[in-house]
Image (spheres, grey):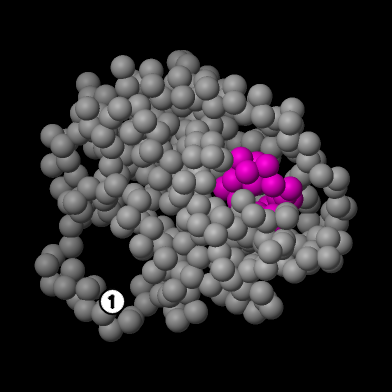
């Protein structure tokens, strides 16, 4: 059996690449071959446009888009680290498919699976068509879903209605947020299983086979992994560092973070794992920064990326509440420090959730 996965996997984002790695590893452990379909949701451009794009890349011209700043000089070492990790650790189809050529992929795979990350986010899907609902796969084929996230637990009724219609042909449905499992189950009239993010399918011991230590930091430190541009998480990280008597090291994820005193340069996803594992404390506004801290049993605090917006924040609160760690969430005005986390009671709970998620994944493949 060979599985074609449709999910984010190429973006220079630690959570994106590590969840892609984890899902492919999990499928491999289930005894099936799997790879990500290299797909672009627009028609295949003519040859001259592809040549022009390649020439622009060689000349160092920047592309547009959310991660365009990674083409700038300060971020190039980090981008190369991501590209190296992608080439070495993420299985990707050798063919680049487009909206008008993706039908050719149908004979290459036995089943198709939409993966995790925010693949069902209302911000990233544009009805009436989205590759993340596997709409290019004809009826009767095996369509599967493992832990897609909506990013929010408050999708609009119209979006939920569209998503329910798009996913009714799936052989197995799951979601990462419990609230959205309930909403989607009501909309589709069928069971939608709540499963863990793929990164939590693997234990910390399994992640240690991939993690690399960083030589660019002291023996003990506070790690700030902040994706947004608000000043509050940065100020809180400095407060934690001062209270612990430790320096705060920053993973630059936006140009505004380049001005901190302690920057960690050229950090790929494997080194990111080592930085989380070895930190005395993590301050983050990232879902995956949060779950890797939990998996490695590291003290942490979680913020929202944006003020006054629920979209993209609910998924962090969902997993914290599910594991009884809601007290580690911080609103912008909250500067209180908490006592160390007692992870012992959580281990059994996490193992139980991990076991049920593995059961769902294996049952999909039978």
Q: Position of residue 163 (x, y in %)?
A: 43, 32
Query: Position of 271 compared to 4: left or right?
Result: right
Nearest the viewer among 157 and 341 is 341
**Image quadrant of residue 326?**
top right
Q: Residues within 10 Å of mark 1 (few under 14, many from 20)?
A: few
Instruction: Tell me, yes or no, if residue 356 can be seen here.
Output: yes
Q: Position of residue 340 (x, y in %)?
A: 81, 44
Residue at coordinates 30% horizontally, 27% vertically from top-left? 31
Residue at coordinates 67% horizontally, 61% vertically from top-left? 223
Task: Spot the residue most to the bottom.
Answer: 59
Name the element at disc 1. Answer: helix
Residue at coordinates 16% horizontally, 73% vertically from top-left? 51
Position of the N terminus, as image quadrant, is: top left
When the figure is inspected, residue 271 is found, relative to residue 54, above or below; the finding is above
- Range of magenta residues: 282-304
When the figure is inspected, residue 294 is found, relative to residue 344, above or below; the finding is below
Nearest the viewer among 319 and 295 is 295
Q: Position of residue 211 (x, y in %)?
A: 50, 52
Query: Position of 331 compared to 90: left or right?
Result: right
When the figure is inspected, residue 280 is found, relative to residue 131, above or below; the finding is below
Residue annotated with mark 1: 57
Query: Position of 143 compared to 358: left or right?
Result: left
Q: Where is residue 236 in the image (x, y as percent from the top left)?
A: 79, 61
Count numbered badges in the picture: 1
Nearest the viewer among 255 and 274 is 274
**Image quadrant of residue 366?**
top left
Instruction: Tell me, yes or no, if residue 239 can be seen here.
Output: no
Residue at coordinates 49% horizontally, 70% vertically from top-left? 266
Whether residue 49 is in magenta: the answer is no
Whether residue 301 is in magenta: the answer is yes
When the figure is inspected, residue 59 is found, relative to residue 268, above or below; the finding is below
């Amino acid at each position: 059996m060979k599985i074609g996965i449709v999910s984010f996997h190429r973006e220079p984002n630690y959570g994106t690449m590590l969840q892609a790695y984890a899902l492919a590893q999990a499928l491999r452990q289930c005894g099936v071959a799997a790879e990500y379909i290299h797909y672009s949701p627009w028609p295949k451009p003519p040859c001259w446009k592809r040549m022009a794009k390649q020439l622009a890349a060689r000349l160092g011209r920047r592309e547009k888009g959310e991660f365009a700043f990674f083409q700038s000089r300060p971020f190039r070492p980090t981008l190369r680290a991501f590209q190296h990790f992608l080439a070495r650790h993420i299985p990707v189809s050798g063919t680049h498919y487009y909206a008008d050529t993706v039908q050719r992929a149908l004979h290459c795979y036995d089943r198709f699976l939409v993966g995790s990350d925010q693949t069902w986010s209302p911000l990233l899907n544009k009805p009436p068509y989205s590759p993340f609902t596997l709409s290019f796969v004809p009826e009767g084929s095996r369509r599967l879903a493992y832990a897609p996230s909506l990013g929010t637990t408050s999708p609009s009724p119209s979006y939920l209605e569209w998503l329910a219609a798009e996913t009714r042909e799936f052989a197995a449905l799951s979601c990462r947020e419990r609230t959205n499992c309930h909403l989607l189950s009501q909309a589709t009239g069928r069971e939608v299983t709540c499963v863990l993010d793929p990164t939590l399918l693997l234990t910390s011991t399994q992640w240690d086979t991939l993690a690399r230590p960083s030589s660019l930091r002291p023996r003990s430190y506070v790690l700030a992994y902040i994706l947004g541009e608000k000043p509050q998480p940065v100020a809180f990280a400095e407060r934690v560092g001062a209270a612990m008597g430790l320096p705060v090291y920053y993973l630059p994820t936006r140009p505004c973070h380049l001005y901190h005193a302690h920057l960690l340069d050229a950090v790929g996803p494997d080194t990111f794992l080592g930085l989380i594992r070895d930190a005395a404390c993590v301050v983050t506004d990232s879902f995956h920064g949060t779950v890797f801290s939990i998996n490695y049993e590291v003290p942490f605090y979680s913020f929202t990326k944006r003020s006054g917006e629920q979209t993209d924040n609910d998924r962090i609160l969902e997993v914290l509440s599910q594991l009884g760690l809601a007290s580690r969430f911080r609103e912008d005005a909250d500067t209180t420090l908490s006592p160390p986390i007692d992870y012992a009671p959580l281990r059994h709970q996490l193992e139980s959730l991990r076991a049920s998620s593995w059961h769902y994944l294996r049952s999909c493949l039978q």
